[in-house]
């Protein structure tokens, strides 16, 4: 019961990031025409968005994430990290998970260059990521074959993998394997996002002022 309680607390905290994200700000820039100014700046747009994402994450952790996690675990009788090794791996896995969600957010936001609005797609993204990452239903509750398949997708690395490491559900070899898989997906999604970015910015259309 304590582990399930902890899973629910942490999964809600992590999956709450899906409802916002850089994609909304990026699509708003595109809709209002501010994207032109951002592209003219001497700093790469992706770097600018990454810096904003890190700033938002730090604010979220300090004022919402960590306080809610501590209070939730204390009040609802959750569990602390399985051990110091698991906590370090959990922290590293969380950092990678933010990178995974960032690349997806970039691609969702860039779709606005073709649709002029990505609100519907962003809402769909939030719902799908919450389900496929284990944010709504733990992946181990799915049928075995479905669970195994989902664990090898990049979405599991955003919620399920970090929390299972935190709870000590993986031994060291398994934890490193899943972190390695996270890093592979981070690299592949990064390449895909950059390629899509280079293609999409050629289609800039300004709507509004």
Image (tube, rainbow, N blue to C red):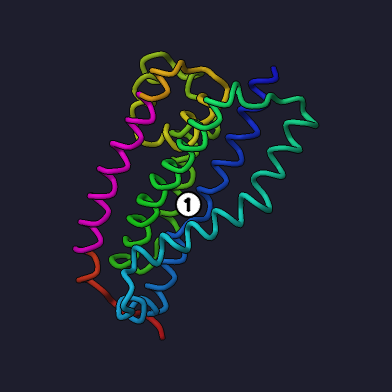
Q: Say above or below: 170 vs 157.
A: above
Q: Main secondary structure of the magenta part?
A: helix
Quadrant where the C terminus sits is: bottom left
Q: Say above or below: 103 vs 9.
A: below
Span highlighted in magenta in the image: 177-199
Q: Nearer the viewer, residue 181 or 133?
A: 181
Q: Position of residue 185 (x, y in %)?
A: 30, 38
Q: Position of residue 50 (x, y in %)?
A: 41, 59
Q: Is residue 74 left or right of residue 64?
A: right
Residue drawn at (46%, 37%) of the image: 92
Q: Is residue 139 magenta?
A: no
Q: Position of residue 174 (x, y in %)?
A: 40, 18
Quadrant where the N terminus sits is: top right
Q: Which residue is mark 1?
A: 123
Q: Residue furthest right?
A: 75
Q: Position of residue 146 (x, y in %)?
A: 38, 20
Q: Is residue 150 left or right of residue 81?
A: left
Tell me which corner region of the image, top left, top right, bottom left or bottom right, holds residue 9. top right
Q: Residue furthest front?
A: 84
Residue drawn at (50%, 39%) of the image: 130
Residue drawn at (63%, 30%) of the image: 8
Count every numbered label the image shows and give the total: 1
Q: Is residue 35 left or right of residue 87?
A: left
Tell me which corner region of the image, top left, top right, bottom left or bottom right, holds residue 59. bottom right
Q: Is residue 198 magenta?
A: yes
Callout 1: 10 Å neighbours few (<14), some, many (20+)? some
């Amino acid at each position: 019961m304590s582990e399930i309680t902890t899973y629910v607390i942490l999964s809600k905290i992590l999956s709450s990031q899906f409802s916002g994200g850089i994609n909304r700000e990026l699509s708003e820039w595109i809709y209002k025409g501010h994207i032109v100014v951002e592209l003219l700046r001497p700093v790469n747009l992706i770097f600018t968005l990454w810096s904003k994402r890190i700033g938002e994450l730090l604010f979220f952790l300090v004022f919402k994430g960590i306080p809610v996690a501590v209070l939730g675990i204390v009040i609802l009788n959750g569990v602390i990290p399985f051990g110091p090794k698991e906590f370090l791996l959990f922290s590293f896995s969380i950092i990678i998970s933010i990178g995974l969600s960032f690349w997806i957010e970039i691609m969702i936001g860039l779709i606005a260059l073709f649709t002029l609005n990505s609100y519907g797609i962003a809402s769909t993204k939030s719902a799908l990521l919450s389900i496929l990452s284990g944010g709504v239903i733990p992946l181990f509750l799915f049928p075995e074959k479905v669970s195994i398949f989902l664990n090898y997708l990049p979405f599991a690395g955003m919620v399920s993998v970090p929390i299972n490491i935190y709870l000590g559900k993986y031994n060291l070899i398994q934890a490193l394997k899943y972190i390695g898989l996270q890093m592979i997906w981070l690299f592949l999604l990064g390449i895909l996002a950059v390629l899509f970015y280079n293609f999409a910015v050629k289609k800039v259309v300004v709507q509004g002022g």
